[in-house]
């Protein structure tokens, strides 16, 4: 017979398991605690609201997990640091000038830029993100170019040779590069090799490279390398950045813009 745990004990054990293994499974927790699946899912939902974990299909992962579980659906990424992303997106939109040609990389932070372009009359926007293109369509007055290619359902973005071939025909003023991981040793990286390849061509196509990401991405490394910090003109992040990373970025000559959240 399973021991009867209080709600507080149960949630504490869930967090301990996440710290130890990085991931928990709903059905394993049901068996461990002898409670219903509804109870476990409620536990995970409440812990996620407190920003102590991230729910994924079948369970949850450690909110500080660095790379193994990075490649999650965009619907789940939207719940991560949503407040910080919203503020970063509004700030980044203010750095755009009317009449510019910009690239919006796929991502939940770059999506927030797309939502904040009401003050512009003339923009040409290139993106590989289907969800971002749908948001941009509401403006009507913009020239929106959606790159073709193979659809990645996880990120709602296009990748592959068709997307890369199309991108080679464009020269742009600014690239807003979404970032999954940033480390001092390995630079900017992403979980998907095809995404990394397309991002590298985006960098080649733009005069100014702006990496935009919340501070939770610092100190992480994903599978595929995109670029080193030397190729980035500006980094926009929130005030959760640690003094070590702030000092490192400033020492490289890359412009660092910290947004208060």
Image: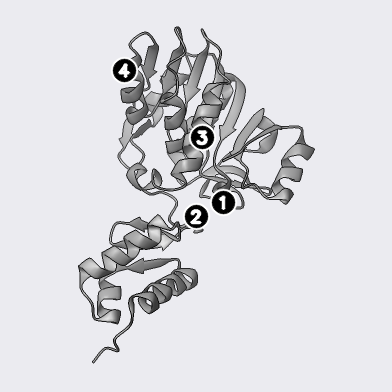
Mark 4 vs mark 2, CA separation in Å: 35 Å
Label 1 and label 3: CA atoms lie apart by 24 Å
Mark 2 near mark 1, Cβ–Cβ under 8 Å? yes
- SS type, badge 1: loop
Q: Which residue is mark 3?
A: 87
Q: Residue at x 51, y 58 (%)?
A: 64
Gap in angstroms between the C-alphas marked 2 and 1: 6 Å
Q: Earlier in the sequence, mark 1 or mark 4?
A: 4
x 41%, y 61%: residue: 61
The percent coordinates of residue 24 (x first, y second) are 36, 68
Q: Could you tell me residue 44's position as x and y percent?
A: 34, 63
Circle 3 SS class: helix
Q: Nearer the viewer, mark 3 or mark 2?
A: 3
| Residue under label 4 | 138
Identify the residue at horizontal 43%, vertical 74% (top origin).
12
The answer to whether marks 1 and 3 mark residues whose Cβ atoms lie closer than 8 Å is: no
Q: Is residue 46 left or right of residue 225?
A: left
Q: Are marks 1 and 4 in contact (CB under 8 Å)?
A: no
Which residue carries the number 1 mark? 221
The quarter of the rendered structure image containing the C terminus is top right
User: Can you tell which mark lies on residue 67?
Assistant: 2
Q: Nearer the viewer, mark 1 or mark 4?
A: 4
Nearer-N-terminus badge (1/3)? 3
Please provide percent x and percent y for residue 66: 52, 56
């Amino acid at each position: 017979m399973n021991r009867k745990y209080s709600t507080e004990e149960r949630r504490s054990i869930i967090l301990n398991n996440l710290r130890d293994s990085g991931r928990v499974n709903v059905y394993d927790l049901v068996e461990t605690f002898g409670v219903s699946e509804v109870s476990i899912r409620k536990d995970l939902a409440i812990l996620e609201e407190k920003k102590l974990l991230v729910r994924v299909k079948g369970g949850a992962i450690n909110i500080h997990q660095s790379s193994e579980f990075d490649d999650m659906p965009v619907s789940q990424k939207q719940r991560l640091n949503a407040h910080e992303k919203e503020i970063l997106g509004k700030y980044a939109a203010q750095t755009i000038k009317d009449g510019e040609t910009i690239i919006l990389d796929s991502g939940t932070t770059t999506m927030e830029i797309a939502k904040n372009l009401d003050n512009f009359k003339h923009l040409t926007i290139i993106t590989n993100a289907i969800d971002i293109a749908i948001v941009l369509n509401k403006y009507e007055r913009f020239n929106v170019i959606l790159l073709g290619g193979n659809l990645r359902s996880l990120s709602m973005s296009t990748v592959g040779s068709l997307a890369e071939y199309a991108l080679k025909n464009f020269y742009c003023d600014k690239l807003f590069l979404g970032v999954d991981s940033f480390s001092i040793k390995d630079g900017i990286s992403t979980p998907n090799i095809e995404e990394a390849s397309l991002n590298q061509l985006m960098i080649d196509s733009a005069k100014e490279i702006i990496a935009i990401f919340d501070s939770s991405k610092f100190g992480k490394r994903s599978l595929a390398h995109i670029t080193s910090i030397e190729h980035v003109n500006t980094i926009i992040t929130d005030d959760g950045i640690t003094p070590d990373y702030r000092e490192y970025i400033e020492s490289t000559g890359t412009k660092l813009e910290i947004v208060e959240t």
